[in-house]
Image (cartoon, rainbow, N blue to C red):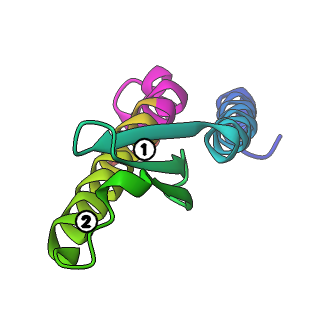
Amino acid sequence: MKGGPQYGNMMKQIQKMQADMAKAEAILAETKIETSAGGGAVKAVVTGKQQLLEVRIDPSVVDPEDVEILEDMIVAAVNEALRQSQDLAQKKMAEVTGPLAGGLGGLGLPGF
């Protein structure tokens, strides 16, 4: 038998991890994260895969004489949404790879 029973077990673990990763990726793609800046004047919505979906701006903060403040609020809202999205993605991937007890070393591969 090529590789023996340990090889077969390792392949099953890899296949399960691949399926779990695909599921986590699908969840991240569907997850929406909304943040705001300027006391809610600017809102940003991103997916768990760091895609910007939407920016909403309260018309009361649109001042043609002071566009810079609005720009700063947009940047702050988008950056916070992306940060939260990245945190979520790391947690989801850790759920998938965590059971491997230290990454590939948990698969019994020499040198890992």
Label 1: state its secondary structure: helix
Pointer 1 or 2: first along the chain = 2
Q: Which region is colored magenta?
A: 92-108
- Residue 85 is labelled as 1
Label 2: state its secondary structure: helix
The spot of residue 111 in percent (x, y) is 32, 49
Amino acid type assigned to the residue bearing label 1 in the image: Ser
Left or right: residue 53 versus residue 62 is: right
Is 29 placed above or below 98 here?
Answer: below
> Contact (CB < 8 A) between labels 1 and 2?
no
Kindly report the distance in space between the C-alpha atoms of the residues bearing marks 1 and 2. 23 Å
- Residue 70 is labelled as 2
Q: Nearer the viewer, residue 20 or 36?
A: 36
Amino acid type assigned to the residue bearing label 2 in the image: Leu
- Residue 49 is labelled as none
> Who's the residue at 24% across and 36% down the image?
39
> Who's the residue at 41% across and 30% down the image?
91
Q: Quadrant of residue 64 in the image? A: bottom left
Is 47 covered by the magenta stretch? no
Judge the density around disc 1: few (<14), some (14-19), many (≥20) Cα neighbours within 10 Å: many
Tell how many labels: 2
Q: Is residue 104 visible?
A: no
